[in-house]
Image: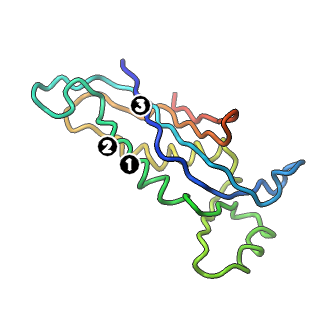
Amino acid sequence: MTTIIRRFVETDTGHRVPNHKSKCRHFHGHRYRFEAEIHGDVVKQPGVSEEGMLMDFSDVSQILMERVHDIIDHAFVIYEGDEEGKRALDLLSNDHRTVVVPFIPTAENLAKWAFEQVEPHIKTAYGNALSLKAMHCRETPKSWATWRKD
């Protein structure tokens, strides 16, 4: 079994953890970095573009851009149960990018969310076994969370 990991362009995303005991309960943002970990068998079909690869890195990047980056980059992610936060965001103009989610937007939950957005799109055209095994969400250079499918 071979593993590839693809990191893509960071997102600048705002959030808050409404019940946090410290400063994370305030509106703030991070430069998030998501990394997809894909396991599988190398393509053995002679002469195809992906021969010797699990999946072309550029194809992985396109999926990550469309399914994660383009949704939350330069947006504010807020928990649907955060009534105070939603009221504050309602005061902004209609073109403010707000993404309401059914979970508190911690790195742990964002890793799981990103996994769920990407997994159905990790496919092979050449019959090799292939699966998304983990999504890593780096919130800061020293802190990250991983959602792993076992």
Of callouts 2 and 3, the N-terminal one: 3
Q: Residue placed at 27% from the left, 23% from the top? A: 42
Residue lying farthest top? 1
Q: Is residue 50 above or below residue 123?
A: above
Neighbour tally class for label 3: few under 14, some 14-19, many 20 plus, Cα within 10 Å: many
Q: Distance between the residues labelled 1 and 2?
A: 6 Å
Q: Is mark 2 on a helix, strand or loop?
A: helix
| Residue tagged 2 | 59
Is 1 drawn above or below residue 24 in the view shown? above
Amino acid bearing label 1: Ile
* First along the sequence among labels 3 and 1: 3
Q: Nearer the viewer, residue 117 or 25?
A: 25
Q: Are marks 1 and 2 in contact (CB under 8 Å)?
A: yes
Q: Residue 38: which numbered mark, if any?
A: 3
Q: Residue at x 31, y 43 (%)?
A: 59
Q: Position of residue 118 (x, y in %)?
A: 44, 46
Q: Position of residue 8 (x, y in %)?
A: 46, 43
Q: Distance between the residues labelled 3 and 1?
A: 13 Å
Q: Nearer the viewer, residue 13 or 1?
A: 13
